[in-house]
Amino acid sequence: MSKINDIIKEYGTPTYVFDGDILRKRVLYLQEKLKYDLVYAVKANTFIPKIIEDLVARYEICSPGEFTICSDLRINQNQMVISGVYKDYNSIFMMMHDYPNILRYTIESFNQYELLKKLALELNRPIHLLLRVTNGNQFGITEKEVFEIIKHNDSDLIIIDGLEYFTGTQKHSLTKIEKEINYLNDLIKKIKTEANFTIKEVEYGPGLPVFYYQDEEFLEDEFLNNIKNLLDTLNVSKVTIEIGRSIAASCGSYLTKVVDLKTNKNGNFAILDGGINHLVYYGQTMGMKIPYYEIYPIKDTKERLDYHLCGSLCTINDFLVKNIETRPLQLDDVFVFQKVGAYSVTEGISLFLSRDLPKVVLIKNAKVYLVRDKIKTSEFNFPKNVKE
């Protein structure tokens, strides 16, 4: 990112930086390779949906809070898919009543189906449904429940469009994806044969992998081409691809500054003003893997030292990276950790030790915007209204 030096000077650390120009290039690349409409899973990063509004077909919204964010961003109702394992009466009533053009609702349980059917009848509001099929975890419904809903749906207000299927993230195996698509085709055929019902569309989450660490290699062009060929075999009229991590990861960086240096019998330690409360990499355990990063200011020196990079939390678990070989560090050097556009900003243990939440900076059309200032978490952790 060419603007990092300016951002460091203007906003300091710790800070998240999300580059909308990189984000848009990433979405266009995925569209080019997959050739299907993309559904952005908002949970991956709630700061970036508006930047790709003209590029993605839909937004997967999994909580009332995510819905509030998207509605306040003025995301089109006809791009919204209301998902989530827990749907409450008041939230769904508000959505159906105030937002009549919401595109789809997913069904994660038979109780959810009954709730949405009840509200649709109360409000005399037609709704479109996607039935999420479980793979054995807490999400979705069984095949038996799929058939039960289809066979017993006696209301013209309830329009069942198709199926949703997502079994997890970071899938490296084409064989696993092929098995899932074959399973969907078998289920679609079974529904047609036994329930005399045509599944019109499938929203499928392939769980595309992101390779965060320097020792990993990945031929993404070939991988995506193979997935596209597998998707072509789905026997429905419409396929959409739900993606979160793979869309958002590459657009993000996390800036954190060296605030102390020390050496003992176990090596050199650099203490940073961030930590594991802010920086989360999928698959990272106690800092054993080395993510992609840069150090600012950039210096041309051949001398190298080994460091353990630790955050500012009072726990021995706060290792960002162990045994990293870098140029000799100085106070106020800034580490720029890359590929943090997905989940880091929301997955960290942000309230631990009552340290401030980092600033969030957005780059859009080459301009820099502060979209969230730092937030004092001491206000969240303070016991108010306690009498003496």
Image (spheres, rainbow, N blue to C red):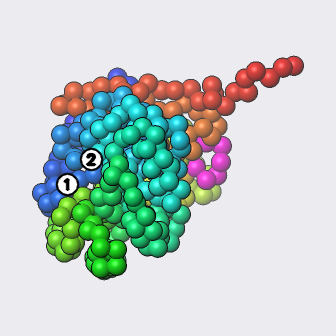
Q: Residue placed at 48% from the left, 26% from the top?
A: 374
Q: Is the residue under label 1 in contact with that under label 2 (CB below 8 Å)?
A: yes
Mark 2 residue element: strand
Q: Is residue 107 visible?
A: yes
Q: Which residue is mark 1?
A: 37
Q: Which is the main secondary structure of the residues drawn in magenta?
A: loop
Q: Is residue 133 left or right of residue 115?
A: left
Name the quarter where the N terminus is drawn.
top left
Q: How many numbered dots are placed on residues in this image? A: 2
Per the rendered image, the range of residues in magenta is 310-318
Q: Where in the figure is residue 213, as x and y percent of width and height?
A: 36, 60
Q: Where in the figure is residue 143, as x and y percent of width and height?
A: 43, 73
Q: Is residue 93 above or below residue 234?
A: above
Q: Where in the figure is residue 221, as x and y percent of width and height?
A: 17, 66
Q: Is residue 346 left or right of residue 291?
A: right
Q: Which residue is mark 2?
A: 58
Q: Nearer the viewer, residue 44 or 291?
A: 44
Q: Amino acid at mark 1?
A: Asp
Q: Is residue 31 above or below residue 363?
A: below
Q: Is residue 22 above or below residue 194?
A: above
Q: Is residue 214 visible?
A: no
Q: Nearer the viewer, residue 121 or 380?
A: 121
Q: Amino acid at mark 2?
A: Arg
Q: Where in the figure is residue 176, as x and y percent of width and height?
A: 34, 77
Q: Give yes or no for residue 24 being in the magenta stretch.
A: no
